[in-house]
């Protein structure tokens, strides 16, 4: 059990560090220190090094987001799903005092190194979120084209707005974006 806990702690810590500093600015040594894990255990659990740890951190963030979206999309629909997506990122930004953002976006905006596995993991995460939102929109009356466009807009707008909030040290842009996106969602499902 302790093995899994230490490993999980490393992955969660890596997701947090990536969301704060990006992939290139974060070393395996710093990830271990941030996670409170011995450096040796990092290499034990992640023989693929920083790339493997980054992939698993992105997958961790993806799974967390999928759980948040699924809970609301399945029970209450796309407006509630949008609100939960916004609230999740609001919580990340505010509780980190505007120091953390999305680890998936952080990996996406960096030039890929020799191993582009982290970038591929980020691509899949964005696809998962977009597909989930689009499916909910379709299930609530949106045409296929409107569902895909709106879902893409939601993911892109929220991810970009999280970066703006960090730079501005304010949540105001997220509030404005959420209001605008909710109007768009209501327009395509009504």
Image (cartoon, helix red, strand yellow):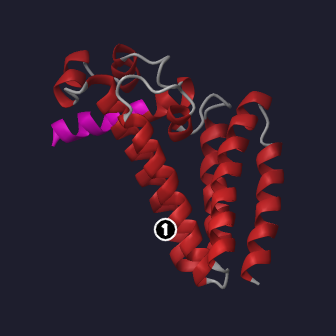
Which residue is rendered at x = 61% and y = 33% of the image? 96
Q: Is residue 20 magenta?
A: no
Which residue is rendered at x = 15% and y = 43% of the image? 1
Q: Is residue 77 visible?
A: no
Q: Which residue was labeled with disc 1?
A: 70
Which residue is rendered at x = 60% and y = 36% of the image? 101
Q: Nearer the viewer, residue 13 or 148?
A: 148
Residue 79 at x, y percent in the picture: 68, 71
Q: Nearer the viewer, residue 157 or 93?
A: 157
What element does badge 1 sit on? helix
| 189 shown above or below 1 | below
Q: Which residues are magenta?
A: 1-14
| Location of residue 12 by image quarter | top left
| Location of residue 121 by image quarter | top left
Which residue is rendered at x = 49% and y = 29% of the image? 18
| Location of residue 80 by image quarter | bottom right
Task: Look at the image and tell me in which quarter the C terminus lies.
Answer: bottom right
């Amino acid at each position: 059990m302790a093995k899994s806990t230490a490993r999980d702690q490393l992955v969660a810590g890596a997701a947090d560090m990536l969301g704060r500093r990006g992939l290139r600015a974060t070393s395996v040594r710093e990830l271990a220190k941030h996670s409170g894990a011995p450096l040796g255990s990092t290499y034990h659990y992640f023989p693929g090094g920083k790339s493997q740890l980054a992939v698993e951190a992105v997958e961790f963030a993806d799974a967390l987001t999928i759980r948040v979206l699924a809970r609301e999309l399945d029970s209450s629909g796309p407006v509630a799903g949008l609100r939960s997506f916004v609230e999740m990122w609001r919580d990340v930004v505010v509780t980190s005092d505007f120091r953390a953002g999305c680890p998936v976006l952080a990996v996406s905006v960096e030039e890929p190194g020799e191993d582009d596995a982290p970038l591929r993991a980020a691509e899949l995460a964005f696809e998962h979120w977009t597909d989930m939102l689009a499916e909910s929109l379709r299930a609530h009356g949106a045409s296929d084209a409107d569902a895909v466009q709106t879902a893409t807009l939601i993911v892109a707008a929220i991810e970009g707005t999280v970066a703006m909030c960090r730079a501005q040290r304010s949540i105001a842009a997220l509030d404005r974006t959420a209001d605008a996106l909710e109007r768009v969602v209501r327009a395509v499902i009504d």
